[in-house]
Amino acid sequence: MSFTEIVSAIRSGALQAGRLVKLDTPLGTDQLLPQRVCGRSRIGRNYEFRIDAIHVSATFKHRDLMAQPVTLWIQQADRTYAPHHGYVHAVHKLGSDGGVHAVQFAFSSWLHFLRYRHDARNWQDKTVEQILADVFNQHPRARGAFRFVLRDPLPVRSFVQQYEGDWNFVHRLMEEEGLFFYFEQAEDGKSHTMVIVDSVDALPAAGPAQVPFCRSAVGDEIDGFTHWEEAGELHSTQLTTRTFDYKQPSSAAWSKGTAVPVTGQSGLPWEAEVYGYTGAYTFGEKAQGDRLSRIRVEQWESAAQRVRGSGGLRRADAGRWLELVDHPDRQTGGKPEDWQFVIIETVWGIENNLPVSCATRQMPRSLKADIDALRVAHGGDADALAVHHADGGTGFFVVQIEAQSRLLPYRSPFEHHKPVMQIETATVVAGENEMVRTDELNRIKVRFHWDRLNGDTSRASCWVRTAFADAGGGRGAVHVPRPGEEVLIGWLGGDCDRPVAIGRVFNGANRPQWHSNGILSGLQSREYGGKGYNMLVMDDATGQPRMQLASSSTGAHLHLGYLIDQNGNMRGAFLGNGFDLKSQAYGAVRGGLGLYFSTHPVTLQPMDARPASNQLVNAARVMDSLSQASVAHQAESLEPGHDTLKTFSDATEHSITGALPDGAAAGGLTAGGGTGQANAFSVPLLLLASPAGIGLSTQASTHIASDAHTNLVSGKDTQIAAGRSLIASVAEKISLFVQNAGMKLFAAKGKVQVQAHADDVEVTAHKAMRLASVTANVQVVAKQEILLTDGSAYIRIANGKIEIHAPGALDFKGAEHVFGGPARMSADHPAFPKSMPTTPLALSTAASPVSGSSLPAGMPYKLFADGALVRQGVIDASGQLPVDHHPGTQQYSLRLANGVTHEIPVPAEYHSAANGELANQGIHFHEGDESGAADRAVHRQSYQDMLNPNANA
């Protein structure tokens, strides 16, 4: 065939008729004449064909083929053609020989385009099937060109992140889940479909399933295998894994691990175990962990038992199964399934059966060297692998396969790995109108800076655990990051699916509260939806260290150390030293066992009140001394006040021993400290002490109330000044005793009145007594008589008579003496009250020892007197219960609906009658028996009974 004839034949397409292989390309039907083909296809991997072809077009450009669809047709044994469709991804012009041009190109499935796309995104609560579909659909050529044929449903993954190319991403997902795929070719050669499966049972047969094993001497164009070999390899015998699930930490009962042995490995060394930590929370349930481990073990089993064959089987392709027949070893028996194999990989070597005259000189990079090597390797089967054409052209076809028994599961090797992540930052996000987004573990949602798909919403990431300064069961430091803040994201084990917030950083939008000078440190929170804050700031200024704990709410703060006026980042003027505790609202200082306020010099023990106690002891001595003097002069004793003061001072000197609290474990850890003794109060006292003075001041009123005694003791003088009046109202008596310098009672204006409404008035002087009226008169008035006496002489005025008697002389001197007839003058006496007002009896629930901090207002009650119901109702807001007391009553019982009972004896039952009088006035705590709350069901029934009393009660 001349050169001109060859060119004409190529252009007309006649030269490809009946050839071993032929091509469809965008250049036109049969415009490229294939010379040689090398191809490879593997389960779970892409296929690729490299083709040497010739053409006669002088205008051919690389771009004419690049990324374009092509179809390679391979002639079958029955002279039909099987297509292999794909897209060109590499083109090389090899050279020219006269007017014939040689070109080499490679094509693969649409999966090849995944190599050129990289992405950074994540999925939440999706299966791998859904994720793969999302990725595939990003590629136009893949849409509608894939399908899933799965035996078992895939589990939902809470979070999957892609931070790599699509190629690596989809392969590693399928490897992790035990998925693999093969390709189906459309009969018209215009498309192909990826079929993703999880079991070899889903793979189709290779056309007629039975494939013969042939000896090379039987003739040419063998449609079977001429070579078959089996191989086995040693591998590990068991896979043992561990993981850690922070939501359900490991325990002795469930160690979060798996141990999956390899089947059919008897006799192999037992120590051939693979143990590994699979990463953080790889699986939650043991069944899921066993499934993942089984996938890896099945990959070992598959790789350890392989067969390899070669021959002229035209229909061989990866992802098909066949049954080998006519093999000598099969004559020994066995089941048909024992000779059924799944083709894992297929390698083609083809030289087209073109006329010899179409051969061009060997070009660099051509496939001729590869085909020649295959010829040499299969030299003994040369006749069986030769393919002849009617025009005398002779080609070459050899296929090599790697397979495994169809009885074994197949899993792709784990060749694609997750990207190893580095520390990065992300922005905290929340849902719309949410000020914060968190959960019971204080996890957060973040948006990665590279995320272009998710906005600032709570779907931007999975729940991300946050590292805190301290974290433990029932303890720790909690500062939940807020939306808009920037956090540092680390990855557990570098795993892109396991983010954790390991810190937080400031940025231009979220600036630090204290900055630039480096001496202010601490914590400051921020009010949700407002500008308020809580703050703990530590100031390390040279010579001026201080600490401030503050809340913008009510301006409450505690300022310690060197006090300054701080405003944000500014250190202001000096305010003083010590501490400043204040609030614009309320304040309370409480000590359940006692409080001590002092300006005495600081000692090591906080309750060391010896200076104050000594002063109280001295005050008791003063009271005792003056009390004795008062009694000696027939005034009242100060003994009750002295005794209470002594009791108070004794209570301030109480020693306690450091020890473990009641109920604490005997083996507790104290590092050898915390032992010894310290001063405390024996009863819950409040003690205020100062060596330099105490001042109380108010623009309103000062109130001092004591249920028992009130003692005022001063070593020198006690002054009382009142801007208006000094008024005292005493229930029993007033006793004033002055030991040395006398007593003065002056009224600059107004009357001085002294009245005894029920008894005598006695005025006695050891020396002279003077009664004088400076500007008016002196009146002495008595209803019965007036008696003046001295030295046995007397004047008596009584019953309208005047008696003047003297044992001696009576001396009357005057300018005149008038002794006229009778006369009289009446004197008015002040009107005294006929009876004293009495305080009505009322029971005060607040005074009961079993009362809580709140009054039982609104609580139904029943009041019993000596066992008889005398009153029932609901307690009002005052907590006071008026009682119509009868003298014969010995015991009151107050029963509340919540089950609390107050047993209240009358004064005769008290240890001291004086206490009874006080208790009946609601002043003193009663000394009765109280019972606590009963069963809740009893309370509810009692409550209903009291709300709905019996009308006959």
Image (cartoon, rainbow, N blue to C red):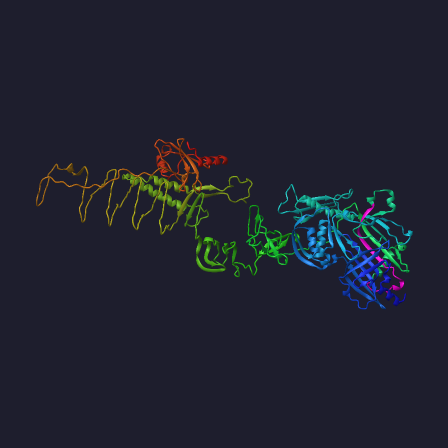
Residue 924's place in the image compared with 61, above or below, is: above
Left or right placement of residue 697 versus residue 313 in this view: left
Residue in the image at 46% along x and 56% along y: 562
Q: Nearer the viewer, residue 292 or 249?
A: 292
Tell me where residue 565 appears, x and y as whole percent.
Answer: 45, 58
Q: Nearer the viewer, residue 7 or 811?
A: 7
Q: Nearer the viewer, residue 595 or 317?
A: 317
Tell me where residue 260 appears, x and y as whole percent.
Answer: 72, 44
Q: Quadrant of residue 847?
A: top left
Q: Quadrant of residue 169?
A: bottom right
Q: Is residue 294 visible?
A: yes
The quadrant of the rendering that contains the N terminus is bottom right
Q: Is residue 232 visible?
A: no
Count the marks: how many? 0
Question: In this picture, which residue range is highlighted in magenta?
Answer: 339-365
Residue 340 located within the stretch drawn in magenta: yes
Left or right placement of residue 433 versus residue 899 in this view: right
Tell me where residue 772 appears, x and y as whole percent.
Answer: 19, 46
Left or right placement of residue 918 versus residue 552 in this view: left
Tell me where residue 210 appears, x and y as whole percent.
Answer: 84, 48
